[in-house]
Structures are given as C-alpha cells and as structure tokens.
Amino acid sequence: MRSTPVPPSFEALRTAVAAQAPMLAPGRPGLRLLLLIALIAVVIGGVYAWRSQPEPEPLPPPPPVSGPSLLTPASTLSPQSGSAQSGSSRSGTLIEVTVHVTGKVRRPGVITLPAGSRIADAVQAAGGVRKGAATGPLNLARKLVDGEQIIVGAAGPAAAAPPMADPAPVVLDLNTATPEQLEQLPGVGEVLARRIVEYRDGHGGFRTVEQLREVSGIGDRKYAEIREKVHV
C-alpha cells in the first residue's frame, strides 16, 4: 500500500508543537505559570459569583386590617353603642346645665348655661332681679347644679317673718304703696303694679278706690279681689 503524502502546512504545525513541548512538561516554569493563572481565574470567578448573589429585601409591612379593631369591646359594636358612649360622656363631663329660675326675676323660666356657671349668671340670664327686690339668702357665687330650681327673693328659714299679733290682713294705701308692695295684692304682678303707679302719678293720686277700674288690666273680677285690701 502506498502512504498518503502529508501536507506541508500540517508538517509545519507539528514541528511548532514539537518545539514547544519542552515548555509544557511537568515541573517546568510554563506549566506553573498556567496553574497560577488558572488559580487566579478561579478565585476571581468565585468572588464575582459571591458578589453577584441577590440580596434579600425586607418585606413591606402588612396593610392595615379594615373593620372594627379586634381589641374593641363587644359592647361598642352593638347598636346601642352610640347612646352608651354619649350617656357616659354626659355623666362624666357636662357641657351645659339646665336650671329653673323663678321668684323675683324679670324673665323667670328654664335656662341653659355653660357648665361651671354661677347662680349670679343664672339670675342675670333671667333678666336680673326686679327693681327694688332682693335676692334673699341665695349664694350668688355657688356653681349651678344641673336640674336645680333657683328661687330668687325667697325668705330663708332664719328670715321668716314673726307671727303678727293682729290676724287682720294688711291694707295698702294706694297713694303711698311702692310697686313691690302692690305686687303683694292678689293677681297683681310687676307690670300691673307699674301701671297703678303710673296712673297715680298721672292723675295726682287716687281719690277713691273705684278709680282702680280705670287702670288697664284691672277688670271686675280682679277689682273685686283687691278692693278690700287697699284704701285711699
């Protein structure tokens, strides 16, 4: 058999490899250099791979749970919770107080004032004390109590009038009686007492008791109630 001729280029490659073969022998500096390069490449690849690891990110906080809180008492979830809370607020801290002012004031009635007000504030809100009248034993500096009644001008137990020796009723003089004294007559209030005084001043005094009929507001029935309690 005839052998195939080797191409010149392959022969040149084989010659170059054979020339470098001594450098790749074990223990040679060339092989050590290759091993060192390979070791460095491995270390660099490991560092790069370690730094390329994904870092864990913190989870976002859970969204707030809608609806009633788990710590809310069961009573607050009932239909009566609103009234219970409002009732407790009313019993705990009052915002307003309501009192009834009566007696010798210009506008008696039920009055609502801010909490912490005094009796003097209630009397002032009722129009003040009537002209010539006194407040009586009231302590005007006392704080108001919700729901109480304030009687202005009422005589206290110590100021009670002594028993009269004469049981006969007091008869007033129409020409000298003050408006406050006239208010003691049956059915005569502040307005009617002022009209009697105005009539007296405008006509030069009363000459007869029957002239009371000419005062506006005094009819036959009222005149019959007071005619025995006055004189001229």
Image: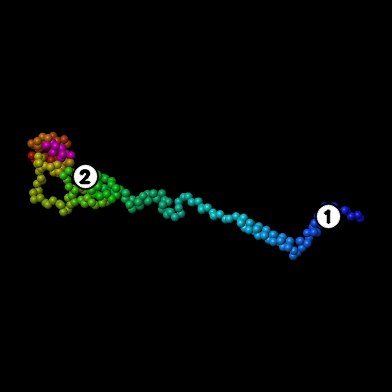
- 216 to the left or right of 76: left
Give the residue displayed 72% in from the left and 62% down from the top. 32
Provide residue 106's location: percent of width, then percent of height: 21, 43
Camera sees residue 221: no
- 127 to the left or right of 52: left
Give the image quarter of residue 217. top left
Give the residue displayed 33% in from the left and 52% down from the top. 93
Q: Is 214 contained in the magenta span?
A: no
SS of the residue at dot 2? Answer: loop
**Range covered by the magenta-colored residues:** 191-201
Give the image quarter of residue 186. top left
Check disc 2: other Cα within 10 Å, few if <14, some if 14-19, many if 20+. some
Provide residue 67's location: percent of width, then percent of height: 46, 50
Q: Is 194 contained in the magenta span?
A: yes
Check disc 1: other Cα within 10 Å, few if <14, some if 14-19, many if 20+. few
> Which is more toward the observer, 33 or 228?
33
Give me the C-alpha separation between circle 2 and circle 1: 136 Å
Where is mark 2, residue-wise?
A: 128
Q: Main secondary structure of the magenta part?
A: helix
Give the residue displayed 57% in from the left and 55% down from the top. 56
Tell me, for residue 65, which label it has, or none: none
Where is mark 1, residue-wise?
A: 11
Provide residue 31's location: percent of width, then percent of height: 73, 62
Provide residue 37's location: percent of width, then percent of height: 69, 59
> Which is more toward the observer, 80 or 103?
103
Against 207, residue 83 (above or below) is below
> Which is more toward the observer, 34 or 145?
34
Q: Amino acid at mark 2?
A: Gly
Q: How many labels sit on residues?
A: 2
Q: Amino acid at mark 1?
A: Glu
- 184 to the left or right of 55: left
